Image: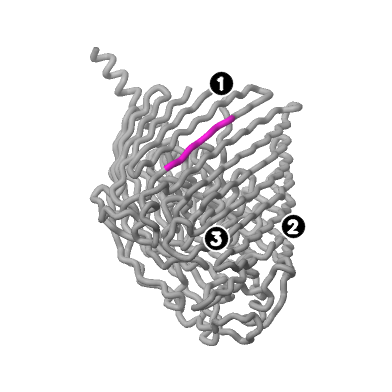
Amino acid sequence: MRSVVLFTAIFSVAFAQELLLEEIRVKAQREPFTDSLEIREVRESSAKDLGEALQKIPGLYFLRKGPIANEIVLRGFRRDNIRIDLDGVYIYGACPNRMDPPEAHVDFSEVQKVEVVKGPYDVRHAGAMAGTVVVELKRPKPGFHMNLNLSAGSFSFFNPSGSISYADDKFFGLAGFSYRYSKPYKDGDGKRITEYANYKADAINSTAFNIRTGWLRFGFSPIEGHQLEVSYTKQKMDHVLYPALMMDAVYDNANRFGLKYKVKDLLNLELYYSDVDHWMDSRYRISPYMATDAKTKAYGGRLEGNWKGLLMGFEAYYRNWDAINYMMNMSQNVIPDVDVKSFGVYGQYTKDVGQNLKLTAGLRLDTTKTEADSSKANTNLYFDYHGTRSTSKTDVYPSGNIQLTYKPAKDLEIFMGLGHAVRVPDPQERYFAFKRMSGWDWVGNPELKPSRNTQLDLGLRHSTPRNLFKANLYYSYVMDYITLYKQNKINNTSGSMNNQAMSYANVNARFFGFELEDRLSLTDTLFVLASAAYVDARKDTKPNKNIKDKDVAEIPPLNGRVALRYDTGLYFGELEMVAFATQYKVDSDVNEQRTSGYAVLNLKAGVNYKGLTVNAGVDNLLDKKYYSYLSYVRNPFSTGVKVPEPGRTFYLSASYSF
């Protein structure tokens, strides 16, 4: 009996070392400006979507509008400043309120890992001005396998999912399905988030979200060294509540199709198609009825070759966005059937310069044409506020970067990066047009220029078999950063009764900050995980355009997390504290308010034995009521309601693989 216990203890320690220390090793080998989130880290959390899960990475945050579909924020940048790549597929949300950001259209059960490039250091993706989030989907292991997952928790959260796969030397196939359901969560005061907005009595405790996702992926090798892969995902989101907004999503349906053909490591072809069909309205609210029918689609691809450290490629994509708002027996083409057509060429070269120095340099050139349907566009509104009736714009712009990694010692890397990347204004920022009955209108700016980010990064990484420490400093100068502001009317042809409109302007802005992260193995079974991040952002003022505040809106305050984890391999326990300072620096031009700081405790534990994994936890252990710094939004149909974070939340997940 004693020998059995001893063997089990040795096996447990070895398994813990294999799991967590392997993660330290793998993360230490990432490119200097790249961080990753493994699916293990997701499964151990209570996160309902990708935006919420990624906040584990220093410098990443999320914007909450409701109980799900949270939007990724990277170092204070969001929206199209960040490029989202779902395993080679670009998908764009259809909602003008950003109810469905691109990352909302992927399910955890599809995902193997997520890599985040921080900064303008990715020439493979058009518009990656502030960074890139690359979601890698699961690929089957050799043989026949099945994976079953079940997650449940507070507020009636229920999430069963599963997949089945087969792979051999010539063929692989994978199919899966996921279902996510929940009621509205309660805050630390025991109040449902729907009680903060104008919901009808029978909707306060109704369904908060109801999401079904199915996927199919298969591939084969027609000849040795060649690989063809085809993938398809369909997602149906129904009855999704957004207390921060005036409307809720009745449905939000998405399709993703991808095709890849790879010839060894020499040639890679990727093609894709995606679309989103979205309807939102105010049927659950005590307010006059309004609705928006929005659709978007995209298709494109890239062809690239790799030879002796030189990567060359071509990328092209087409994007269309159309949205009609219905209110007071009146319809408005708020996004007037806008097309975006883009073509880019790029190259990247990597070379070891001596034994201890690595050089990576990349260049890219893009041309993009953005064009609204002139028969649908409210050009009178553009003329009233910006003095133009333009419905078309063509932008040509270069991007590039240089990265140096110096290794003065076996366990130490020092890296530097200087990058420049550009992103074109999106269809909403240029051509949105919404005439209100009172207050102020909301109008795009057809004369917006592309935003150009020039960024310098300095950092170091110290890694040993038991420890990974990373530190990074960065400074970004963004020429023609796109900001919200209130524009005074300069003409009067649209018949609008208002004299001001919320619109978009170009200003120069500066972002600077730091990130620290440490993963330390104290003993064979005791680990410390810690991180901290800070970003500050200032913009130039333009008093003649009512841009008077130097602070950039929606910038996270100083924050950090520390966790103590005991892990034998067979079972683990972890206590975590997450803390945010008060957000003092706010943009008064758009009525942004300060948000108080907070600290919360999270506790979790789990067991892993022969293919069966069971995790349980409680977030916000002390049931504290608090708000994230991004607890309210200023979208065209916002309520002005601040949405609190969840109170004490219990969760349980089980996974079995064979």
Q: Position of residue 162 (x, y in %)?
A: 50, 30
- The stretch drawn in magenta includes residue 176: yes
What amino acid is found at the position of numbered circle 1 in the picture?
A: Phe
- Reading the chain from its start, which is encountered first: label 2 or label 1? 1
Crowd rating for badge 1 (residues with CA inside 10 Å; few <14, some 14–19, many 20+) = some
Magenta: main secondary structure equals: strand
Whether 630 is drawn above or below 147: the answer is below
Marks 2 and 3, the one that precedes in the sequence: 3
Q: How far apart are marks 2 and 3 (CA)?
A: 35 Å
Q: Mark 3 points at which residue?
A: 291
Residue 390 magenta-highlighted? no
Q: In this view, does 393 lie to the left or right of 8?
A: right
User: Identity of the amino acid at label 3?
Assistant: Ala
Query: Front-most of 221 and 633?
Result: 633
Residue 52: give x, y in percent of width and height: 43, 50
Q: Mark 1 points at which residue?
A: 144
